Image (spheres, helix red, strand yellow):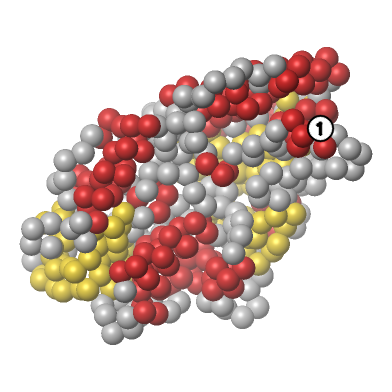
Amino acid sequence: MNQENSDIVVIGAGVSGLSFANWWRELHPDQRVIVLEAADEPGGYCRTVERAGFVWDYSGHFFHFKDPAIEAWLRARMPDGSDVRTVERIAKIRYAGLDIDFPFQTHIHQLPKAEFIECLVELYFRPGGEPQSFGEMLDARLGKAITEKFLRPYNEKLYATSLDALDKDAMGRFFPHADIADIIANMRPGKRSHGYNASFTYPAGGAVQYIRALERDLPAGTIACGEPVVAIDRAAKRVRTPKREIAYSRIISSAPLPKLAQLAAIEHDPRVFTSNRVLVFNLGFDAKGPRDIHWMYFPDREVSFYRVGWYDNILGGDRMSLYVEIGAASTDFDVDALQARVLADLVREGIVTDQRLVASHHVVLDPAYVHITRASLAETARLKTALAAESIYSVGRYGGWTYCSIEDNVIETRALAKQLA
């Protein structure tokens, strides 16, 4: 087996891994970095598929930048003339045949009068005490009516688990909190609350354009695709792949944390690391469908999907281009049967009328949304500390077993590169 040396070995050529490689190269252009990627192409879940003139991602990857410097850093690496759209988000919730503006809790005045009053009463008389789970937090902050009409059924479809099993802060800043003052203030005519991501950016060529930007400044040979890590020898500080052994000074890994622990043969409790799986259908039709909508949430448990998004309304296409997401506890999917059910549900919900399906693609994301529990938080903190003590650093959404944005991954790896410099 070939023997090589590298100052840094990065596991995973997604946004986190490629971002770190770029940040490190800026600080140490003389040091060697090797990025090992198990898949045949870089990008992780941030990959794009082109089929029959449609441009789809593995899932809806839209970019909500809070730090203009991070967005500028990425855009500076894109080719001149790149078409990056800035879009004011239009999101709806399909509730009992009505389309309610997102987030639900600040638009309850759009409900029928009796349900609106029910939500207000339950909000005012919401239970006290310190919540011990995500489900209890929803009841305590927003009342049982708002929770049971949308927040619980929708999120249990998404996470494919009981919200009472999740930590109270499982979604962190991404949960659109609201108090009574917010809800009442939003009832003024013309007032509309957007939540945490009122606008987003998206490249015309798909999310992979950001991956191409992150590849641009890396020297040839930095990224090795189709080369998974099969073992990490912590004592000898060597990484083994099917092709070679690489001696390293440090490892930066964006692999799922339990997978990294397994590769490094470090004691861990795999039972605490649970997640949902998401089956994504990308569907292309021969004609336009609904306009003035970017994505829609479906809390109804009888509807197969929890969310639908419209690429054509983001990119200005003249044919309806959808992504449709289904959450599940396992990957035992009957794809053909589920696609037929999805198409039937799209018709039932009035999204598809007389349009004809002309192209399709599907992908399973596993893991997709991790289940953040008190046990997972404790084991994640313990493992990351133990690994870091041996110069192995776990980063990113799955490396940190957390809920975060793509921008968060870029910021995290920048901070780590500076820390290690």
- Which amino acid, mark 1? Ile
Q: Residue at coordinates 16% horizontally, 53% vertically from top-left?
A: 231
Q: Position of residue 245 (x, y in %)?
A: 13, 65
Residue 383: x and y in percent read 25, 45
- Farthest-out residue, right: 189
Residue under the image location 56 percent in, 37 percent down: 325
Residue 131 visible in image: yes
Q: Position of residue 322 (x, y in %)?
A: 64, 44
Look at 53% across and 32% down and name the residue there: 158
Q: Looking at the figure, which quarter contains the C terminus? A: bottom left
Q: Quadrant of the N terminus?
A: bottom left
Look at the numbered disc 1 and give the secondary structure of its residue. helix
Quadrant position of residue 339: top right
Q: Mark 1 points at which residue?
A: 184
Residue 319 at least partly seen? no
Q: Quadrant of residue 86?
A: bottom right
**In-front residue for pair 67/15:** 67
Residue furthest bottom in the image: 30
Residue at screen point 77% across, 34% down: 181
Q: Is residue 93 left or right of residue 129?
A: right
Residue furthest out toward the front: 129
Label total for image: 1
Q: Residues within 10 Å of mark 1 (few under 14, many from 20)?
A: some
The percent position of residue 18, horizontal first and vertical second, equals: 40, 66
Closer to the camera in the image, 73 or 59: 73
Q: Is residue 214 above or below residue 94?
A: below
93 or 70, nearer to the observer: 70
